Image (cartoon, rainbow, N blue to C red):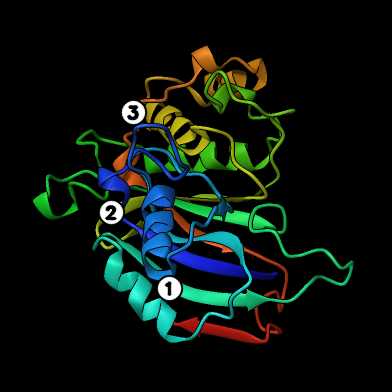
Amino acid sequence: MNRYFLEVAYKGTKYSGFQVQENAVTIQSEVEHALALYFRSAFRLTGSSRTDAGVHALQNYFHFDSDQILADKALYNINAILPEDIVVKSLSLMQAKPDGNPPHARFDALSRQYKYFVQQKKDPFTRETSYYFPYSLDLELLHKAACLISGCSDFTSFSKRNTQVKNFVCKIEESKWVEENGMLQYRVKSNRFLRGMVRALVGTMLQVGRNKISLERFQQIIDARDCSLADFSAAAEGLFLVAVDYPENFFAQNPGSASI
């Protein structure tokens, strides 16, 4: 049996999230449908990183198993079937790992990187890909709040309820605010993210930037491990999964791949 990795990108505006859900259209359901149409066989995909309804991705991954050797032209044909807001960027036939186990899209990922875009001026062209937040912000306070996040390990306060995880510990590798092309961006990189975590971090930091809460209060919210204290109001449309990082040469040593 051959294991393949699919690299995908998508605009999540019209979708009820990444993972298959009953009676809902998701990224996974659309990709599985396209594969089934092309190969005339059902595929069950495993994703690397779940994204919520309305969230976008510049890079995400699925893996699946097949007894077929998929030709290079498969990539073109799959994209022809997919809707215009989802694209398969590469298709890679994977080799077994040194321990003999097949690569896993989720468990072999080392880290994920997100960007959250905040637009402070009304712009109809960024309406579905940024959070319109027309309020004055103290950028120095935002920078200091982002630094506090870098020193945090337990993110219970920034996780939605009813999350089926064993712990709320995340290793933050980057947390910072930048200004680029007239828009604010929050950039964060971690080994893992909890459900709703980035939007809760952004929403709460924006309250710091508006001087609605102090840096001291922000630290108290972190330490309290109580999600009722965080602000989850940051809209989904501003959030992008921009990269999923795997070990060096994870894809380079594979016997076959196709990309666009």
Along the line of sight, which residue is nearer the eye, 94 or 140?
A: 94
Mark-to-mark CA distance, 3 and 1:
39 Å
| Residue at mark 3 | 210
Relative to 126, is 19 above or below? Answer: above
Side of 180 relative to 168 (left or right): left
Numbered tag placed on residue 89 in the rendering? 1
Q: Nearer the viewer, mark 3 or mark 2?
A: 2
Secondary structure under tag 2 reads strand
In the rendered image, residue 5, in percent from the top left (x then y), is placed at: 58, 68
Q: Nearer the viewer, mark 3 or mark 1?
A: 1
The reply to whether residue 22 is visible in this rendering is: yes
Mark-to-mark CA distance, 1 and 2:
27 Å
* Circle 2: residue type: Met
Q: Nearer the viewer, mark 1 or mark 2?
A: 1
Chain-order first, disc 3 or disc 1: 1
Side of 173 relative to 207 (left or right): right
In the rendered image, residue 93, in percent from the top left (x then y), is placed at: 62, 77
Mark-to-mark CA distance, 3 and 2:
17 Å
Chain-order first, disc 1 or disc 2: 1
Q: In the image, what residue occupies the spot 12% across and 50% down? A: 123
Q: In the image, what residue occupies the spot 37% across and 44% down? A: 26
Numbered tag placed on residue 183 in the rendering? 2
Q: In the image, what residue occupies the spot 42% across and 65% down? A: 40
Quadrant for residue 250, please give it.
bottom right
In the rendered image, residue 145, in percent from the top left (x then y), is placed at: 52, 36
Side of 253 relative to 143 (left or right): right
